[in-house]
Amino acid sequence: MGSIVETARVSIFPLSGALLFPGLQLPLHVFEPRYRSLIKDALARDRMIGMIQPVRPAEGAPLFEIGCLGRIEDVEALEDGRFNIVLDGLRRFRIVRELDVTTPFRQVDAELLQEDEDEVLYPVERASIEQEARHFADSQGYAVDWEQVSRLDDVALINGVSQVAPFDAASKQALLEANGLRERCELLVQLMQFYGHHDGDDQSTLQ
């Protein structure tokens, strides 16, 4: 028998370039009235919202199929109605259909995706991603505490770099949609090589 499909009704925050990955955090400054309403509604219920990218940055634009469900962990309510929040990434979701709602924010029926929490990288893959990340950070002029990076587990490393790397929206979406840690790692290496080379870094291609 097939596995049980878990679904949920998700209130979504469409935001181009701002991806959330499971196990990571995303700070957000919320100022638009509709998304203030979204945060108020989430705080009154289960503190859950779904981060997802629009296909293009326009009002009511179609959405990419896959996003990430997050729980509001920290919240600062400002006097003028704005919020500063921190989301904890929980699970990726796939939109089944968008709902016809009266709320100012959009809502969807979504399938909550299962993650293989036991998947790890082979030592050669771990070494390759760390080496490529060093090349990429150098090409971008980033200062990185590599000792701290070396202590991250594989999921935190791959998802962390995927979330913060300065790739375009489509590339970051592809990373989010990758099925499994190893596939995401392979794509991440390819993107760092491409963007590093594009920015003028003459780096060798890792095999």
Image (spheres, rainbow, N blue to C red):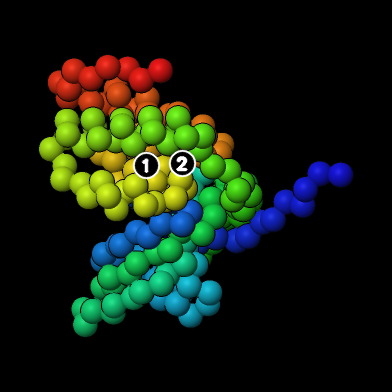
Compared to 205, does 51 lie above or below?
below
**Mark 2: few, some, or many residues within 10 Å (few <14, many ≥20)?**
many
Q: Is residue 196 left or right of residue 57?
A: left
Q: Position of residue 146 (x, y in %)?
A: 25, 46
Tell me the mark number nearer the camera, choosing from 2 and 1: 1
The structure residue drawn at horizontal position 42% and vertical position 70%, both measured from the top left corner, is 72
Q: Is label 2 in contact with label 1 (beta carbons under 8 Å)?
A: yes
As drawn, the label of residue 176 is: 2
Q: Is residue 151 visible?
A: yes
Figure quadrant of the C terminus: top left
- Give the amino acid type for the residue marked by disc 2 in the picture: Leu
Q: Is residue 12 visible?
A: no
Q: Front-most of 101 and 76?
A: 76
Q: Which residue is mark 1?
A: 162
Compared to 83, does 104 lie above or below?
above
Where residue 172 sits, quadrant-wise, is top left
Q: Position of residue 192 (x, y in %)?
A: 30, 29
The structure residue drawn at horizontal position 72% and vertical position 51%, both measured from the top left corner, is 5
Figure quadrant of the N terminus: top right
Q: Front-most of 111 and 189?
A: 189
Q: Position of residue 54 (x, y in %)?
A: 40, 43
Please report whichever mark, 2 or 1, sits nearer to the chain's N-terminal start: 1
